[in-house]
Image (cartoon, rainbow, N blue to C red):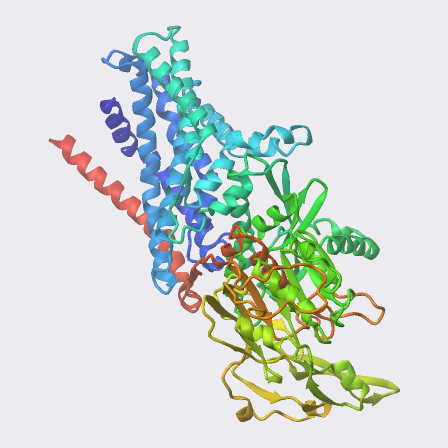
Amino acid sequence: MLSILKKEITSYLSSLVAYVTIGVFLLVLGLFLWVFPESSILDYGYAGLDSLFNTAPYLFMFLIPAITMRSLAEERKEGTFELLLTRPLADWQIVLGKYLACLFIVFFALVPTLVYYYSVYVLGTPQGNIDTGGVIGSYIGLFLLGAGFAAIGLFASSISKNQIIAFTISVFLCFFFYNGFDSLSRLLSLQNLNLQNLGITEHYESVSRGVLDTRDLAYFVILTGLFLCLTLFVLLRQRQKSITGKDAIFCGATLGILIFLGIISGITFTRFDFTKEKRFTISAISRHIMGSLKAPVSVTVYLKGDNFPAGMKRLQRATRDMLSDLQAYSNNKLQFDFVDPVANIKSLSDEGQKKIYDSLEAKGIIGQNQTVKTDNGVSEMLIFPEALVRYKGKEIAVNLLQTRIGLSDEDVLNNSIQNLEYAFSSAVKKITSGGKPIIAFTEGHHELTDLQLNDAMKSLADGYDVGRINLKEIPFSLLMKIRLLVIPKPDSAFTEEEKFKIDQYIMRGGKVLWAIDQVNAELDSLRGHGGEQMSFAKQLDLDDQLFTYGIRINYDLIADMRCAQIPVSTGNVGGQAQIQMVPWLYYPVFISMSKNPIVKNLDGIRSEFANTIDTLGIKNVKKTILFTSSPFNKKLTAPHIISLQAVEQEPNPKEFQNAPKTVAVLLEGKFKSDFLNRPVPEGLKENIPILPQSAATKMIVISDGDVFKNQVGADGSPYPLGYDHYMRQNFGNKNLLLNIADYMTDDSGLIALRTKEVQIRLLDHPRIRTEKLYWQLINNIVPLGLLLIFAIFQHYIRKRKYAR
């Protein structure tokens, strides 16, 4: 077999056809990767070789058949195959020797592409900012693909003496196995047969990312072994020879191994993630969620379209990769598809287009305008970075793009990719869970109304049972069934009985979200009192209780230069009021730098008349600051006169240079009871034993009750939580609420997935702009130059050898 291998390699590398074939492959590949803008690495902007591993399979469909077409067809045409049979070699050794020779030539053709790796390595910012492990894993995937195509090509070469026919059959079979099964699986009558699993694409796309799944490895081994056995069978049948002796042993052993691999890969599997950050390694929590699915879950991703900017292409690919990874653990229960929601919308009337947009918006799919750079400048493109998860008639929208004030587009994109596993796993868990946890909002103290909490409760309703409770009326036994108690901006005092219920609810492991204003101040009241209002302290009677738990909300207001805007009338023109948006210092926007999963990568949080918080040292209680004001703030102690005329004055920056003020705190641990060594309040009708210390539990204190209030339109219809309809801007308030709910009610630790980190790998754009032509020439000429040098050297060695 080794003699066959050596002969085939020497014969091929001594042929001009070999170097022309490989040279054309390298030239076309170089043009696609470095010149043509649609697939150019330089235009893509990220330090990776994704374009190589996406483009190479289609070029392999021509390169490898060109390599394999002569292996057996030429031998049979020239009559030299019979000479091979005179050697002490079994048929399987001849087939295997020729196959390994073809595989070596494929490897030889890939070696010059390492120049691409060097170029990306040098152009990275900082230099060397390329995931080498991921590239190695992707090359393994490309080599496995080449191994499969080589086996198919060898089979095609065995069934015809004509090299052109062998080449044509090989190209067709390679294309069919790569794309054919995937296309067939989309036919309506065949959608339930999972035919895509028989095709190469399903398995190559996973390995090409740098993740080697043993099921994908088994697939390529089975595909290769099957076509090698078919090749051997064809050769024997052409000679009218039965399969006996060593050939029978080879075929039997090969088929036995292939069947064994197929069975084992269907029962169990493991994965090897070559990437540096292990970004394709799915957490144990997500694996459990996917593995526990009882019925099919479908995911429709609307992030599809033509001429996407590079960032959206990266998010699209990352989303596909994540869903593929989750699908791998779902026993085929998770199915996904990418659709373009506006593919045929231009042909519709304005009314028809509006109906489509309205239907998408009703499902939570809201388009975003993205600026796209073109050769003619810039243009606007409507993109839908959302997905819809469906299960048994229920639907949950998943936002894929995590925007954030002040971050660059690359940082926003990276944060979004980091959040994908949590976004999809959380959505699937919520939509498939049986008994939903109960979240209750208190009422009876002039808290936020149902209308003001409309979107907060509606958003939570996808994964929770949500309602209102009155602490005076609810029995304690029912209170204990609530997983999270939310106190949303009370305006009147709590009685001792109500405080006792809250305290003992906490002592028994209950979790509380306090959203409290300590100062009475409202913009609507300000407008209705001549533009001035005296802000004064509320009397909620909660200070002693919060103090016991380690928190003090102060009677003051925060004026912050990082703030939202409000509409102010600046006069009348032609009988119409002139409205201008102006910064309102009492509406701070909080941006967290914390790595805590509740607030990590959240967009700015819009607040109204927030107070400062002091934390106290309490034993067995851990405190985490979630939000602070900006460093450009000023504290105003109540009582204080607030005037709309303040918008006419430019704030003095020197007065606003102060340390950031704490406005939201997470407390975790064992809390001491506020009623320790105190009698049970009089009038309490239930017998509730006093527990002096809580079990391990959590609470969150936010010094603003308006963070979970949605705005209400003039017609009485509520806006989405976090949407400021005056500024026409979305803030992160809704995501904050959903993250808090997940963190407080989910004991599985799913929310911890939000701490996942993925490194941004960018190319040096200024350097590319000045050296683009240089690197295009390097990556198109150097691989061809290396090939030419090798050809000359090989010819020289061969000439010297035979000259002797």
Would you say residue 673 is visible in this rendering? yes
Q: Is residue 345 above or below residue 656?
A: above
> Which corner quadrant holds the N terminus?
top left
Compared with 179, 470 (above or below) is: below
Q: Residue furthest left?
A: 804
Seen at 37% across and 46% down, the residue is 274
Closest to the observer: 524 or 512?
512
Q: Quadrant of residue 393?
A: top right
What residue is drawn where x is 50% and y is 43%? 287
Residue at the image position 64 percent from the left and 41 percent from the top: 298
Judge whether residue 152 can be spotted in this image. no
Q: Residue 356's spot in the image, x, y percent?
A: 77, 52
Q: Is residue 235 above or below residue 645?
A: above
- Image quadrant for the C terminus? top left
- Up-down relation of residue 745 to residue 288 (above or below): below
- What is the x, y in percent for residue 658? 51, 87
- In the image, residue 551 lies at what x, y percent? 55, 74
**Front one among 241 and 520:** 520
Residue 1 as seen in the image, left or right of residue 217:
left
Q: Nearer the viewer, residue 193 or 734?
A: 734
Indicate the position of residue 102 as horizontal and vertical percent values: 34, 30
Say how many tags the image has.
0
- Name of the residue lying farthest toward the right: 575
Q: Quadrant of residue 67?
A: top left
Q: In which quadrant of the rendered view does residue 331 lie?
A: top right
Viewer-proximal residue among 72 and 455: 455
Describe residue 577's horizontal placement relative to residue 459 as left or right: right
Q: Using residue 780 as the reference point, say whether residue 201 is left or right of it.
A: right
